[in-house]
Image (cartoon, rainbow, N blue to C red):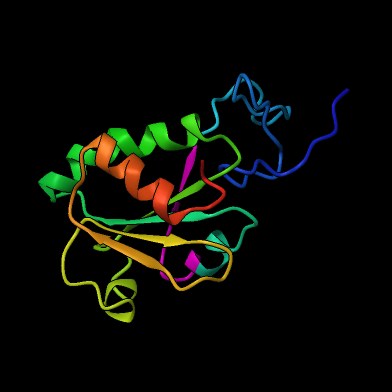
Amino acid sequence: MAEVTSCPTCGNATGCRPRRREHRSARNAGRRCPGSVEAADATVEGVVATGVPVLVDLWAPWCGPCRLVTPIFEDIPVERPGRLKVVKVNVDESPQIAPRLVVQGIPTLFMLNHGQPPDRQIGALPAPALTQWLDAHASDAT
């Protein structure tokens, strides 16, 4: 039986089969790894603490551009398994984060990369432009 560790993509303590992207505990057996996690005001600090670069997406359900880029964010962890974590923060449900980070518009992305100052991208990007931005700002994400 394989050793169970934390999934590097979603942070689930039960572990993940990298190729099949399925969790391997009795509680989560066969479930697909979500690839991204959601965070709130009280949990964001713990969720972004990881050994891989973290892409933080500040969004809201009513935001049209936010909804347009959601499928792109779902594909990122699948394309870069274990090398990049995606954290989604709904600014309506977590109202303290946007003012603390001086966010004036959504979607806003932050790349947190091993203690370096965060890089910021404001507005929706098409998939090729987002990939280029990720490659330029996350040394371990490629």
The vertical placement of 103 against 137, above or below, is below
The one nearer the camera, 1 or 27, is 1
Where residue 90 appears, as percent x and y from the top left, is 30, 57
What residue is at 49 percent from the left and 30 percent from the top?
78
Q: How many marks?
A: 0
The one nearer the camera, 124 or 135, is 135
The vertical placement of 28 against 109, above or below, is above
Where residue 123 appears, as percent x and y from the top left, is 17, 55
Q: Quadrant of residue 16?
A: top right
Q: Is residue 112 left or right of residue 50?
A: left
Q: Quadrant of residue 95?
A: bottom left
Residues drawn in magenta: 35-44
What residue is at 27 percent from the left and 63 percent from the top?
91
In the rendered image, is residue 12 in sight? yes
The vertical placement of 76 against 19, above or below, is below
In the rendered image, is residue 93 in sight? no
The vertical placement of 112 against 37, above or below, is below
| Residue 37 lies within the magenta run | yes
What residue is at 52 percent from the left and 69 percent from the top?
45
Where residue 3 appears, as percent x and y from the top left, is 85, 33
The one nearer the camera, 105 or 1, is 105
Q: Is residue 8 left or right of residue 128?
A: right
The one nearer the camera, 27 or 10, is 10
Q: Is residue 69 left or right of residue 86?
A: left
Where residue 6 appears, as percent x and y from the top left, is 71, 44
| Residue 39 lies within the magenta run | yes
Q: What quarter of the picture does the N terminus occupy?
A: top right
What residue is at 63 percent from the left and 21 percent from the top?
19
